[in-house]
Image: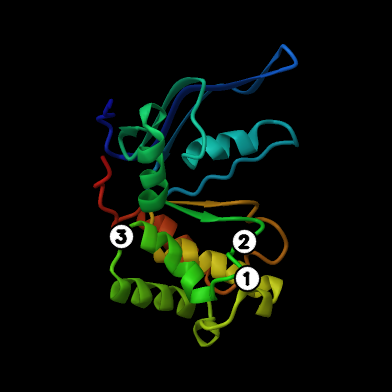
Amino acid sequence: MDKNENGNKLIELKHISKIYYLGGEEVRANDDVSVAIDKGEFVAIVGKSGSGKSTLMNIIGALDVPTDGAYYLGGEDVSDMSDTQLARIRNKMIGFIFQQYNLLPKLNIIENVELPLLYAGVGSAERRERAMAALRKVGLEEKWKSFPNQLSGGQQQRVSIARALAGEPSLILADEPQRPGFQDQPGCAEFSEAAQRGGQHHRNDYP
């Protein structure tokens, strides 16, 4: 696995392209994209519909790999990793705030917040402590036993913010954070502070 020696960069995309073939026609969703992002930096991906924003976000979030080029996250070449390594990268380094929240309906909200920590191998006591602290930051600690269908849309959004914060990730990806109401949600200040910290609590212990 290649290592990028520039330790100041959290993200480096080098000549990234993502190519699909639809009906025999080549579609370049991303074409020769290069960008470097420092730890603690805030970056927005903007553009018109169909410009490749979601494709690029999927690559940055280790949900997909580029057809060509290299992607370094925390100095490691993510574009060269196996599916297992990508899953561990997502779990240990990346916090996701989804537009549709993606909460599991059969789990209460503290269990939803704990779920990524469970996959990361965090012990039950620490898992519960971190999840409750994250819910406290978004003003939902008293709702911890509630299920997603018992919450308003805004409250479900706050649970998704708490879930991202609980993992203390190096990178937080928010899907359309400029949409109405997002910036006013409790927990957004903590979300911003977590991004600025640049993942100082993260341990690079994936294979």
Residue under the image location 40 percent in, 56 percent down:
196
How far apart are the two marked residues, 2 and 1, measured between alpha carbons?
A: 7 Å
- Quarter of the picture containing the C terminus is top left
The percent coordinates of residue 33 (x first, y second) are: 53, 24
Of mark 3 and mark 2, the one earlier in the sequence is 2
Residue under the image location 60 percent in, 41 percent down:
45
Residue 156 - label: 1
Most foreground residue, 38 or 112:
112
Residue 2 - label: none
Crowdedness near tag 2: few (<14), some (14–19) or many (≥20) residues, C-alpha within 10 Å? some
Considering every residue shown, the one lying at the far top of the view is 24
Most foreground residue, 181 or 116:
116
Residue 168 falls left or right of residue 6: right
Residue under the image location 55 percent in, 39 percent down:
58
Q: Amino acid at mark 3?
A: Gly
The percent coordinates of residue 139 (x first, y second) are: 53, 81
Dot 3 and dot 2 residues touching (CB under 8 Å): no
Q: Amino acid at mark 2?
A: Tyr
Label 3: state its secondary structure.
loop
Residue under the image location 69 percent in, 36 percent down:
47
Residue 101 - label: 2
Q: Is residue 71 above or below residue 191?
A: above
Residue 121 - label: 3
Q: Is residue 115 above or below residue 1?
A: below
Label 1: state its secondary structure.
helix
